[in-house]
Image: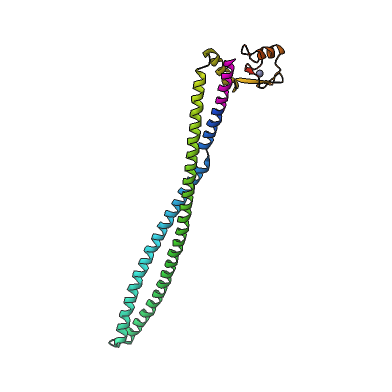
């Protein structure tokens, strides 16, 4: 019964094809890569936000430094006026001393501010370094993962192609009517052939009459299960 052997062979290739197709589907729907890509985007966003806020602090630092320069210049002017001895008016001297004290206070505040800004810039620098190294790491891992997935995908696609080729080659050797019948059973029952084990059809678990078993053993014709319609074969 060459046709039956061909059908059994065909069914095996159909089953393998199904397994590979499912594996490919699962691979494509694996959320690992998607999750990592999301994480990369989030981290990049965080990085750019942090850089932006650091730029703002640097601007404020620059402004504070300019102000400090101005204050120092002003205080120098006042001190010049005070110590040159040209001003003798007491009220004016008092006013200038007051101004000098006020400026000293402002300068001290500005210096504190500058130190705070510098600390902030430094802290953000450290944070940026940490995030950048994390990002590099995660990108590297993601690239490796993607390349591994690509290899797996290529491998599965090759296997699928070879199963499909095998199926086409086998189908060309099988009688068209028989092939159509087999495909119909397979479409309805997911498998087209069932082994008979201990007089039981492995497709539907129903008992096969002895008459049919005898005819199956003769191997002269194709025998169908009376219950599920599958083509029967011996293990
Ligand atoms: Zn059956």
Q: Which residues are magenta?
A: 1-15
**Is residue 84 shown in magenta?**
no
Ligand 1 image-quadrant field: top right
Residue 37 locus on image (x, y percent): 47, 45
Question: Could you say which quadrant of the image residue 233 lies in?
Answer: top right
Q: According to the image, what is the colour scheme of the structure?
A: rainbow
Of 225 and 151, the residue lying toward us: 151
Residue 74 in the image, given as x and y percentages of width and height: 32, 76
Residue sitting nearer the eye, 218 or 200: 218
Placement of 177 over or under 71, stated as above or below? above
Compared with residue 178, is residue 139 higher up or lower down, i.e. above or below?
below
- Residue found at x 53% / y 12%: 177
Query: Which image quarter is the N terminus in?
Result: top right
Residue 6: within the magenta?
A: yes
Q: Is residue 226 left or right of residue 132?
A: right
Q: Position of residue 132 (x, y in %)?
A: 45, 55
Q: Residue at x 48, y 25 (%)?
A: 165
Extreme residue toward the left, this view: 86
- x, y percent for residue 212: 68, 12
Answer with left or right where residue 145 lies relative to residue 66: right
Q: Quadrant of residue 57?
A: bottom left
């Amino acid at each position: 019964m060459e046709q039956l052997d061909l059908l059994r062979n065909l069914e095996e290739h159909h089953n393998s094809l199904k397994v590979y197709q499912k594996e490919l589907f699962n691979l494509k729907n694996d959320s690992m890569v998607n999750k990592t890509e999301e994480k990369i985007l989030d981290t990049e966003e965080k990085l750019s936000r942090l850089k932006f806020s650091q730029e703002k602090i640097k601007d404020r630092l620059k402004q504070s430094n300019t102000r400090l320069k101005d204050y120092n210049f002003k205080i120098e002017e006042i001190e010049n006026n005070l110590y040159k001895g040209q001003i003798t008016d007491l009220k004016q001297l008092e006013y200038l001393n007051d101004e000098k004290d006020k400026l000293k206070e402002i300068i001290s505040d500005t210096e504190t501010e500058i130190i705070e800004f510098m600390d902030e810039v430094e802290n953000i620098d450290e944070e940026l370094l940490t995030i950048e190294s994390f990002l590099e790491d995660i990108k590297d891992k993601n690239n490796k993962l993607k390349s591994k997935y690509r290899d797996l995908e290529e491998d599965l696609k090759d296997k699928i192609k070879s199963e499909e080729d095998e199926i086409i080659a086998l189908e060309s050797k099988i009688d068209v009517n028989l092939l159509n019948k087999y495909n119909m059973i397979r479409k309805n029952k997911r498998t087209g052939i069932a082994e008979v084990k201990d007089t039981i059809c492995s497709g539907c678990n129903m008992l096969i009459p002895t008459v049919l078993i005898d005819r199956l053993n003769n191997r002269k014709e194709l025998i169908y299960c009376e219950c599920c319609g599958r083509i029967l074969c011996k293990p």
